[in-house]
Amino acid sequence: LDIYGFEKREDIFNKTPLDYSPQFQEDGETSAIEITKRIDGAIENGYNRFEWRHKRIDTNEAFDAEVILSSMELQGEPHIYAVVRDITERKKDGQEKKILETRLRQAQKMEAIGTLAGGIAHDFNNILTPIIGYAQLGEINLKKGQHDKIQECFDIISESASAAADLTKQILSYSRQQVLDTRKVNVNSVVDNMSKMLGRLIREDIELEYNLARDLWCKKADTGRLGRDLI
């Protein structure tokens, strides 16, 4: 009586479930259609347990309840026996738990992104160091007229720039913004290269180990996509 807001026991008589149910349930279905299905299910199976959106008679305030319907006969007539339990607090606790879990997953993602960003910055710094250094060395050689050594500087700069391009491709593939570029690739090489980035995504207390077969055939694939699948 209390959960529905009835003052006296007699007030509940001559009432139907629709009298203390809102017009619509949480799934958008009308209570009139849904309650018929629930009752039919109890009559057919002898028992039906479900959650139902109710409302108080005195305030029209909605609340969630667990309902158990049992079909029985009394004096040769079919009857439905109903047990109703208010589960508002239980559902509220469940929703708060889901919110906390979502926040935890988001925090873990942000931590992984921060770790990855730090690792990428370190890699780019390692790539830029020889580019800057050999560019300055090439300028010095040019002023000294040592043209034979300039080509060596250009080769190292070009090699470092290619490494930067490969790293950028890996980052784009991780963010799923890279257009597929399928070609014959050595899977072992892809695994070895991506293991460096993968190592930055896992915690320090986790050790990454892998065993590569030496006789693997080349596979036609996009190296960035294959690396992303590994991650």
Image: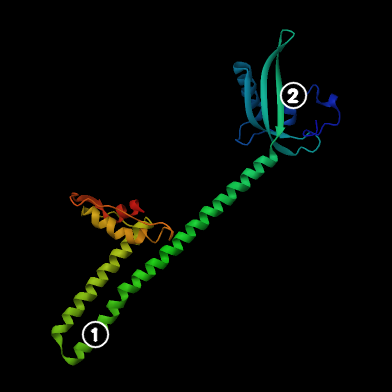
- The residue carrying pointer 2 sits among few (fewer than 14), some (14 to 19) or many (20 or more) residues within 10 Å by Cα, namely few
Above/below status of 146 relative to 103? below
Q: Where is residue 15 in the image (x, y as percent from the top left)?
A: 77, 24
Q: Which residue ends up furthest to the top in the rendered image?
A: 76
Q: Find the residue positioned furthest to the left.
A: 148
Indicate the amino acid at tag 2.
Thr
Q: Is residue 95 left or right of residue 109?
A: right
Task: Say what amino acid the circle numbered 1 marks.
Answer: Leu
> Which of the two labelled residues, at mark 2 and mark 1, occupies the earlier sequence position?
2
Q: Is mark 1 on a helix, strand or loop?
A: helix
Residue 181 versus residue 69 in the image, above or below: below
Circles 2 and 1, Cβ within 8 Å, touching? The answer is no
Q: Name the residue under label 1.
A: 137
The residue positioned 39% from the left and 61% from the top of the image is: 200
Q: Could you tell me which secondary element the residue under label 2 belongs to?
A: loop
Mark drawn on residue 91 = none
Q: Is residue 177 visible?
A: no
How far from the left and from the top, in percent, is residue 149?
16, 83
Q: From the image, tell me which residue sits under label 2.
A: 16
Q: Position of residue 231 (x, y in %)?
A: 36, 54
The residue that appears at 22% across and 73% down in the rendered structure is 158
- Quadrant location of residue 192? bottom left
Foreground mark, 2 or 1, reads 1
Quarter of the image holding residue 136?
bottom left
- For marks 2 and 1, give the CA distance: 91 Å
Quarter of the image containing the N terminus? Answer: top right
- Judge whether residue 34 can be spotted in this image: yes
Give the quadrant of residue 81.
top right
**Would you call the spot at circle 1 few (<14 residues within 10 Å), some (14-19), or many (20 or more)?**
some
